[in-house]
Image: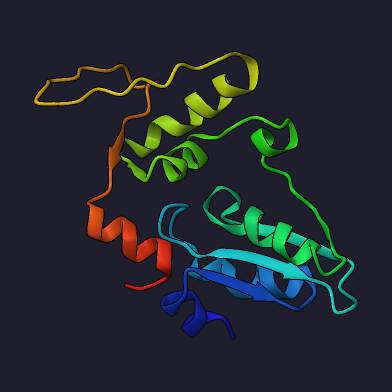
Amino acid sequence: MFRKAFENYGAIVAVFATGIVVRDIAPLLDNKWSDPAVVVVDSNLNFAIPLLGGHHGANEISRKIAELGAVPVLTTATEVHGKPSVEGIADRFGCEVFNKESTIAVNCALLDQQVEVLEVKGPRIVIVDEDVSVLVRKKQAEAKDEGTGNS
């Protein structure tokens, strides 16, 4: 039921029972960086549940749906504790995460402590540990297209 939407859209809002959505998207899942954001909304518009891709748009979509009266059910740890996430910081600065595997350790650290954001302008060589997220600025034209919804 969701295959076409999964392949063609960056976000899906499904007005279905959560179990239906979970069973239908399970075989389609690849990884958090390429799968679309999925928000489940009950038919009475009581709840908006970011099921997939909370840090990749689903939390924000749930907040928008909340303007219609639904309660956003956010479960990403950084959101629950009012802390920034690596993905959110990357979006705010118009960047993409270069070493995606680092986000687990850095998001965990963001829950417990201040994590410094450094801007390094090149040419430079930067050597980092695996628990350091490296954000690379998006090309200007690409960043503009994403901001307007054009691709």
Q: Quadrant of residue 12?
A: bottom right
Residue drawn where x is 71% and y is 62% of the image: 64
Which image quadrant: the N terminus?
A: bottom right
Left or right: where does residue 11 sit relative to residue 68? Answer: left
Residue 144 at what x, y percent from top left?
A: 33, 60
- Nearest the eye: 23 or 68: 68
Report the residue that reaches farthest toward the top.
113
Left or right: where does residue 144 sit relative to residue 29? Answer: left
> How many numbered callouts?
0
Residue 23 at what x, y percent from top left?
A: 66, 71
- Nearest the eye: 113 or 27: 113
- Nearest the eye: 49 or 59: 59
Residue drawn where x is 80% and y is 62% of the image: 66
Residue 123, above or below 46: above
Residue 98 at what x, y percent from top left?
A: 29, 39
Is the image coloured rainbow, by chain, by secondary structure, or in one colour?
rainbow
Residue 15 at what x, y percent from top left?
A: 75, 78
Which image quadrant: the C terminus?
A: bottom left
Residue drawn where x is 34% and y is 44% of the image: 96
Residue drawn where x is 80% and y is 64% of the image: 67
Q: Quadrant of residue 120?
A: top left
